[in-house]
Amino acid sequence: MTLKQTECITCRVRGCSVLDSCEVETLTAISTYKISKKIKKGERLFSEGDPVAGICFIKKGFIKVELNGKQGRPLILRIAGRGSIFGHRLFEGHTHHTFSATAASEVQYCYIAYDLFHDITIKSPLLQQHLISKVLDELEGIEKKAIYLAHKSVREKVAETLLSLARTYEYGQKEQGFRISLCRQDIADLAGTTKEQVSKTLKDFEKEGLLKCSAKEFSHLNIKKLQLVASLSS
């Protein structure tokens, strides 16, 4: 579905994306060619193996970044929120998506054809720099995830996952909490454990005063203590 267009230069999401601090000429060019769209929860932005046709900037909502796993169960690499970009990791010889992007809620995003975005990027050294930094950050995140999946305990995995969700859902200490659009199985897939272990660990964390949770509502997170739990084997 196509939505009403918003100029990049006045968009409030720009501040948390690779477009932050880009030149006016770059923002104007992207605004000229982009299309505003949205998808419903459960719909895919693209699937693993699809050809990369364009760049997607997430304006609102949350995306599950997944890999095909064993026995049909996906491995959720991360949850992406507003400001996230997809399609930017295209290099010569790598013309297809290496993961799937599924809407975990209704998602609004801006789309621009890859060829047009590529031409704009060539003219903007600042945008090129931002994209390189973004790719490096993502690669570092994948490396860290591989390490904690292999070596961390269930408690550490769940704590790390909660901290990641808190960042994605923009949880602040002064706020009451946040509501996720994920089920316990999604959290388990994200943490690399089972739904039963997630439920048990969340109950343990509640008893220890690390958080309060009810269904999909999380509140009163003790970020410092969760960070200590998540870092025990680092």
Image (spheres, rainbow, N blue to C red):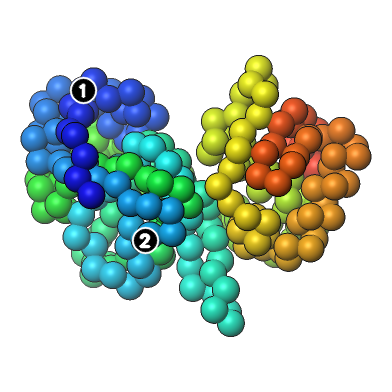
Label 2, secondary structure: give it: strand
Looking at the picture, how far across and down is residue 173, in whole percent?
67, 21
State the image quarter where residue 210 is shown.
Answer: top right
Disc 1 residue crowd, few under 14, some 14–19, many 20+, Cα 10 Å = many
Number of marks drawn:
2
Nearest the viewer among 36 and 48 is 36
Looking at the picture, how far across and down is residue 125, in whole percent?
20, 34
Looking at the picture, how far across and down is residue 101, in whole percent?
40, 58
Q: Is residue 127 above or below residue 101?
A: above
Q: Is residue 57 above or below residue 186?
A: above
Report the amino acid beneath label 2.
Arg
Residue at (17%, 33%) from the top-left corner? 5
Marks 1 and 2: in contact by CB < 8 Å?
no
Looking at the picture, how far across and down is residue 208, in whole percent?
90, 37
Identify the disc placed on residue 97: none
Q: Is residue 137 above or below residue 13?
A: below
On screen, residue 147 versus residue 94, left or right, reads right
Residue at (32%, 42%) from the top-left corner? 108
In the rendered image, the residue lying farthest to the right is: 207
Label 1, secondary structure: give it: helix
State the image quarter where residue 195 is shown.
Answer: bottom right
Residue at (56%, 66%) from the top-left corner? 75
Residue at (34%, 28%) from the top-left corner? 13
Identify the disc placed on residue 9: 1
**Between discs 2 and 1, the one toward the N terminus:** 1
- Say if residue 118 shows up in the picture: no
Q: Is residue 131 above or below residue 44?
A: above
Report the amino acid beneath label 1.
Ile
- Label 2 to label 1: alpha-carbon separation: 28 Å
User: Which residue is denoted by mark 2 in the rendering?
Assistant: 44
